[in-house]
Image (spheres, helix red, strand yellow):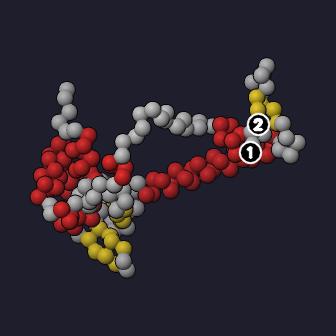
Amino acid sequence: MSRRFSDGQLYEARNHIPIRHVIETLLAIPSETFEGVFRFRCPLCAGRHTAVKSETNLSRCFHCGRNFNAIDLCMIVKHMNFVDSVKFLIDHRQRLPPAEIKPATAKDVIAPDPKRAPLKKPVSVHEIFPGLMGNVLHEKSNTTKKEISSPSLTQNDIAELERLAHDLTRILQRLKNSFI
């Protein structure tokens, strides 16, 4: 099955029409600016504890915990399917004056270097702490048991660091989710 839209078309539909313009003008979702903060009525729960993040061109309802891009909002408010929502946004973008179109960023223009290998994300705390602590941890060559090479660091210290790292990971994930 062939795709109906190129990656570029989908990117433009999601990112090149400012989300605030989509909310206020294109979809006429009730909104207001109070004390310098733009709020709109969530199209799902009707809550007003919402925000837009212009850097990512996304909106969020903190009441129901839902994130929206321009395509999502069109699908919900206009009761359209995905294909019709993208067509609607592409058509609208073509009729926008240049001043209304969100400019391309360096991320849009600069292609990644194909020779550069992607960074490997650490899977466990044991992959992170050696680099942070000057390779205090190392594995014995003849066994899989971890050994401490510094008298100032104990197994209990490592266990405590792992617990703290786990807690920090959960906190960071909640923060990421609140901005997306």
Q: Is residue 55 left or right of residue 43?
A: right
Q: Residue at x 17, y 42 (%)?
A: 83
State the residue at coordinates (36%, 77%).
36
Residue 72 visible, this angle: no
Residue 173 shows up from this direction: yes
- In the picture, measured across the screen, residue 180 lies left or right of residue 91, that is right
Amino acid under label 1? Met
User: Where residue 109 sits in the image (x, y, percent)?
Assistant: 32, 48
- Quarter of the image holding residue 28? bottom left
Instruction: Confirm or deny contact between disc 2 and disc 1 (CB under 8 A).
Output: yes
In this rendering, the count of numbered labels is 2
Q: Amino acid at mark 2?
A: Leu
Neighbourhood count class around disc 2 (C-alpha, 10 Å): few under 14, some 14–19, many 20 upward = some
Per the rendering, the mark at residue 151 is none
Q: Secondary structure at mark 2?
A: strand
Pick the quarter of the image with the C terminus: bottom left
Q: Position of residue 64 (x, y in %)?
A: 38, 58
Q: Residue furthest right?
A: 151
**Residue located at (82% from left, 36% from top):** 148
Quarter containing the N terminus: top left
The residue identified by callout 1 is 133
Q: Residues within 10 Å of mark 1 (few under 14, many from 20)?
A: few
Residue identified by numbered label 2: 137
**On the image, which quarter does residue 73 sit in?**
bottom left
Task: Give the percent coordinates (x, y) of residue 107.
Answer: 37, 49
